[in-house]
Amino acid sequence: MTKTIRRIVTRIGKIGFVERLEKREKIVLAAGGLFVFCFVLYLAVMSPYFEAKGKLERSLQRKQNDLVEAAILQKEYQQLKDLQGGLATRVAQRTPQFSLFSFIENMAAVVRVKNRVTYMKPSTTELDDGFTESAVEMKMEEVTLAQLVDFLSKIESLENVVIIKRIAIQKNKKTSDLLDVVLNIITFEKIVPKDEDQQV
């Protein structure tokens, strides 16, 4: 038995496996071999290349975005620095007794919407460079568009450094021709050192 198997193996070795295949089988075998070769080549070479290329492109895109963002932030910072110089001057020239809360109340009375104010909430936030941000959140209900425009034009004051930071407008639920408005109005004040405050 062992001798028979040995003879068959020897015969196959002499004749050759490929030589015993038909032409169509040889083509199929060659195509299969080519496919396997290409697949192995893709896994070993092309796939890592495309993956590395994709990572590099994403990294470059992130760096470009970071550079653009940094440029925008730098521009905004410079604008704030320029504004701060003028801000300090305008705050110093403003009436010492100026109060944002009182200023808003007075303007509401001038425009005749004081009775439409449902609440006013003051707050203060300490900022860098020796300034504080004083804010008043206020809500008005059932005001006309003309009243709102008039009020906004009188509230924003370059002279008194009063700015409307946020505004939310919606139609009144009872009367669609009237508006409900929530405003966040701010100004800035110079922080007075305690020593100077005591001297005054």
Image (spheres, rainbow, N blue to C red):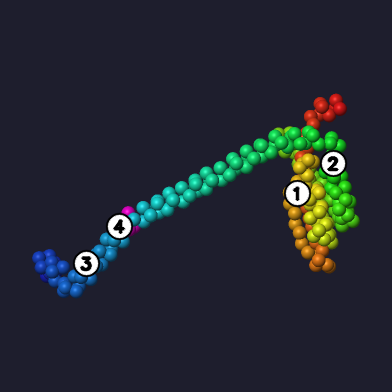
- Per the image, the residue denoted by label 1 is 164
Sooner in the amino-acid sequence: mark 4 or mark 2: 4
Residue 118 lies in quadrant:
bottom right
Q: Which residue is mark 4?
A: 41
Quadrant of residue 158 within the rendered picture: top right
Q: Residues within 10 Å of mark 1 (few under 14, many from 20)?
A: some
**Of the residues tagged 2 and 3, which is closer to the observer?**
2
Q: Which residue is mark 3?
A: 30
| Residue to which mark 2 is pinned | 99
The image shows residue 65 at horizontal and vertical percentages of: 52, 48
- Secondary structure beneath disc 4? helix
Is residue 128 something that shows in the picture? no
Question: What is the distance, in whole Å, between disc 4 and disc 2 at their CAs?
Answer: 76 Å
Secondary element at tag 2? loop
Q: How far is disc 1 from disc 4 in space, using C-alphas?
A: 64 Å
Q: Is residue 59 above or below residue 41?
A: above
62 on left or right of 118: left
- Secondary structure character of the magenta stretch overall: helix
Name the N-terminal-most of marks 1 and 2: 2
Q: Amino acid at mark 3?
A: Ala
Residue shown at 83% from the left, 60% from the top: 143
